Image: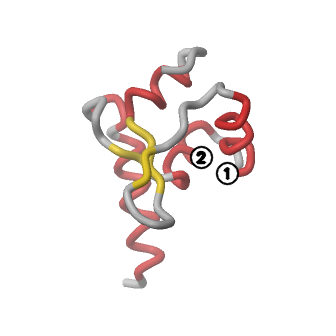
Amino acid sequence: MSQTKRHLELVGTRLEEFDQLPGSALMSVKEVSSLINRSRASLWRDVKAGRLPKPIAVGPKARRWRVADVRAYLEGGAA
């Protein structure tokens, strides 16, 4: 199985289990984009506008959002 296909399956599984994830779990931009059905560019515009909190830096070029922040965003308010 290719690495890309495996990654897409993992993303799908995590999204199916979103309601059971702890608030401290971290989500990638790809996962958040898929979950809310918006483009990555739209996510970054929402961050810039303050509607979505800034993600946490987990590496030099890797950013992740806390599930609690994504839930608050989905409910209409920033965490």
Q: Quadrant of the N terminus?
A: bottom left
Q: Position of residue 31 (x, y in %)?
A: 49, 50
Identified by mark 2, the residue type is: Ser
Judging depth in this view, the residue of 1 and 59 nearest the camera is: 59
Asked whether, in this view, residue 77 is left or right of residue 70, the answer is right
The one nearer the camera, 21 or 77, is 77
Q: Which residue was labeled with disc 2?
A: 33
> Residue 66, located in which quarter of the rendered image?
top left
Q: Residues within 10 Å of mark 2 (few under 14, many from 20)?
A: some
Task: Specify the quadrant of the image occupied by residue 78.
Answer: top right
Residue at the spot x=30%, y=29% of the render? 23
Q: Is residue 38 left or right of residue 33?
A: right
Residue under the point 42% across and 84% down: 2
Q: How is the image coloured?
A: secondary structure
Seen as rendered, the residue at the extreme front is 60
**Residue furthest to the bottom:** 2
Q: Quadrant of residue 36?
A: top right
Measuring 71% from the left and 49% from the top, which residue is drawn there? 39
Picture coordinates of residue 21 (x, y %)? 28, 35
Q: Residues within 10 Å of mark 1 (few under 14, many from 20)?
A: some
Q: Nearer the viewer, residue 58 or 27?
A: 58
Q: How far is mark 1 from mark 2, CA to CA?
A: 6 Å
Q: Which mark is residue 40?
A: 1
Q: Amino acid at mark 1?
A: Arg
Question: Under tag 1, what secondary structure?
Answer: helix
Q: Nearer the viewer, residue 61 or 23?
A: 61
What percent of the width, then of the height, locates residue 5? 45, 74
Vertical order, 6 against 49 (above or below): below
Residue 67 at x, y percent in the picture? 38, 34
Sequence-wise, which precedes: disc 1 or disc 2? 2
Residue lying at 47% horizontally and 54% vertically, measured from the top left: 63
- Tags 1 and 2 touching, CB below 8 Å: yes
